[in-house]
Image: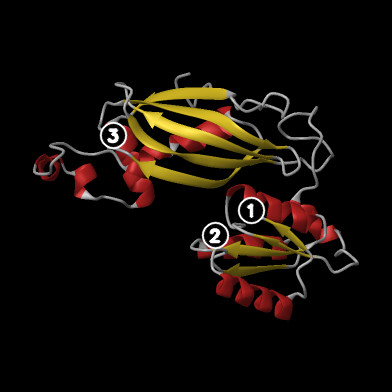
């Protein structure tokens, strides 16, 4: 499918459609107008992108398209095709394999690799290739399908929704004072599990190793929705760090009663 914002309408896919192996593609030819618009929007006027004379002196010999401009079409994929209507992009990894150039026709291909109806989340393998089939960008998308608040899925009226994390504001904490530790809870499936547990009334500990900002963002979102959460850094392969983590959790929330690893 070629990208055309004038006539594209977002698909509305349900979990019955979104099984592992489901794929979608879109293509777009990158133009100078795209690059100029991206530079105006972001303020990135790096001469390697914008100055042909400067770019000619580099190893590329010509201007390179902004990497984030190229990968921004992954957002088009998420919001318009896979899964489409009602999708919320929650995390993305990106590896920039090689540059794109003006006039390249890029193709974004996304394939579902994991589906979690309980958390209404998908994991998709994504690749952006050029007209020669060379991979420009690769990565993994994590996407959540939202609920419209009426008990039916935005993406599909046939899909049975799980409680949204935002509904935690109206829920009470578990009377047993349960505290669940989610290792690797700052991103992807771990993050989705943390939100689902918080929505069910558990106090949640988001463990992380390096993704400090993502972990604290996840905790802040849970707490804004009325839940109890804590971010703790620790390498779970290091016994001393694990002991220190459990001590910190017990001081803040009480003893850990459950674990998602």
Task: Answer left or right for 150 relative to 125.
Answer: right
SS for dot 2? helix
Task: Answer left or right for 163 relative to 224.
Answer: right
* Residue at far right of view: 175
Foreground mark, 3 or 2?
A: 2
Q: Which residue is mark 2?
A: 214
Residue appearing at x 28%, y 34% in the figure: 100
Residue 107, above or below 232? above
Q: Quadrant of residue 221?
A: bottom right
SS for dot 1? helix
Q: Position of residue 86 (x, y in %)?
A: 67, 36
Q: CA distance from mark 3 to mark 1?
A: 32 Å
Task: Answer left or right for 24 relative to 36.
Answer: right
Q: Which residue is mark 3?
A: 100
SS for dot 3? loop
For residue 119, which numbered disc appears in the image? none
> Badges 3 and 2: C-beta atoms under 8 Å apart?
no
* Residue at far top of view: 1
Residue 80, above or below 181? above
Of residues 145 and 196, which is closer to you in this image?
196
Q: Earlier in the sequence, mark 3 or mark 2?
A: 3
């Amino acid at each position: 499918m070629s990208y055309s914002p004038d006539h594209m309408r977002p698909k509305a896919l349900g979990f019955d459609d979104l099984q592992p192996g489901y794929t979608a593609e879109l293509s777009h030819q990158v133009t100078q107008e795209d690059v100029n618009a991206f530079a105006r929007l972001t303020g990135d006027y790096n001469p390697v992108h914008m100055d042909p004379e400067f770019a000619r002196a580099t190893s590329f010999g010509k201007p390179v398209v902004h990497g984030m401009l190229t990968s921004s079409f992954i957002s088009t994929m998420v919001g318009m095709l896979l899964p489409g209507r009602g999708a919320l992009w929650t995390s993305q990894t990106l590896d920039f394999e090689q540059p794109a150039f003006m006039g390249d026709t890029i193709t974004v291909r996304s394939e579902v690799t994991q589906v979690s109806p309980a958390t209404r989340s998908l994991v998709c393998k994504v690749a952006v290739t050029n007209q020669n089939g060379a991979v420009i960008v690769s990565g993994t998308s994590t996407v959540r399908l939202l609920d419209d608040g009426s008990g039916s899925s935005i993406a599909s009226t046939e899909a049975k929704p799980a409680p949204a994390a935002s509904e935690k504001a109206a829920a009470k904490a578990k009377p047993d004072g349960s505290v669940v530790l989610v290792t690797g809870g700052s991103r992807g499936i771990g993050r989705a599990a943390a939100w689902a547990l918080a929505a069910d009334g558990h106090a949640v500990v988001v463990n992380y190793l390096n993704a400090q900002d993502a972990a604290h963002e996840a905790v802040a979102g849970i707490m804004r929705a009325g839940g109890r959460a804590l971010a703790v850094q620790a390498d779970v392969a290091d016994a001393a760090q694990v002991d220190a983590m459990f001590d910190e959790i017990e001081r803040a929330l009480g003893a850990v009663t459950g674990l998602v690893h």
